[in-house]
Amino acid sequence: MGITIQHISKSFNNVNALKDISFNVKKGELFGLIGPDGAGKTTLFRILTTLLIANEGNAKVAEFDVVKDYKSIRNNVGYMPGKFSLYQDLTITENLEFFATIFGTTIEENYDLIKDIYVQIEPFKNRRAGKLSGGMKQKLALCCALIHKPKVLFLDEPTTGVDPVSRKEFWEMLKRLQKKGITILVSTPYMDEAELCDRIALIQNGEILQIDTPKEIVKHFPKTIYNISADNMYLLLKSLKKYQHNYSVYPFGEYVHYSDQRANFNLLELKAYLETKNLKNIQITQTKASIEDTFMELAK
């Protein structure tokens, strides 16, 4: 009862949003679709949740065909879109009761499934949804997506715009839901969240770049990565891009991530070059490749 996607393509006028997408999500797996805005994540989610029809290919969710069995899919999946889409004028309780009623169930019937999440927002159950914080809206939306006990859960960029503490809590909730046997497909532009998934698919411009476990994906990065910092980060970035031996250069938090074309990279030579550019306090240390490094490499 996972997800099977075979050669899905979707175009809007002259824009190819998805190009021959194929992958499987196993039953009970927490699978991440990782990519920036415009990569095609939301379009794929809308096809899998029967809101759009693909131009080519086919897909099954919980063993139901997304076109022929669309009614069955809607009864067996939970969908949390990227934009908060609950009723702003209804309270927490009213929103939950509304969605439970739509699916012919009650809050009490499936309370065990949402209990760990709901207890965090229950003190505010009479507050209107439009007055909730980002983290509380997120928890309410997840409760509404789970209230009918779905077999598969789709979460489209659920932590975008949410504070770091709420993001951490949200992923802990997903891990607990996974233990209850729910198959979860989550999309995110945050590369650090990729490491929390069992497997991931990196997507860019409507194409799958690579599919594997996070550890396996970073294991095959072809170059050694160096963290480089200096007193002027803008000048550092500009200077490294002009360095004749650079293989890749891009900002990474408080550092610039640098890799060299040569097999016999000379750290002191690079430092001497940067000093000629009037850079000071130069620090160069080797580091491990990350999901983001791998994505940047594959997206070249």
Image (cartoon, rainbow, N blue to C red):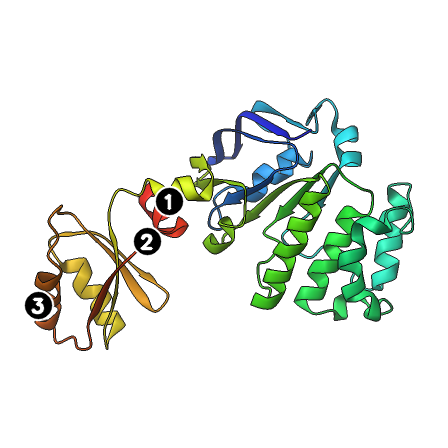
Residue at disc 3, secondary structure: helix
Name the residue type under label 1.
Val
Earlier in the chain: of badge 2 and badge 3, it is 3
Q: Secondary structure at mark 1?
A: helix
Q: Which residue is mark 1?
A: 218
Q: Earlier in the sequence, mark 2 or mark 1?
A: 1
Residue contact between numbered discs 2 and 1, judged by CB atoms under 8 Å = yes
Query: Residue lying furthest front in this view?
Result: 179
Which mark is in front, 2 or 3? 2
Give the quarter of the image for residue 52: top right
Give the numbered dot on residue 65.
Answer: none
For residue 243, side relative to residue 47 (left or right) = left
C-alpha separation, residue under disc 3 versus residue under disc 1: 30 Å
The amino acid type, in three-letter code, at marker 2 is Lys
**105 and 66: which one is in front?**
105
- On-image quarter of the N terminus: top right
Amino acid type, callout 3: Ala
Total labels drawn: 3
What's the distance in space between the residues labelled 2 and 1, CA to CA? 9 Å
Q: Residue at x 69, y 59 (%)?
A: 138
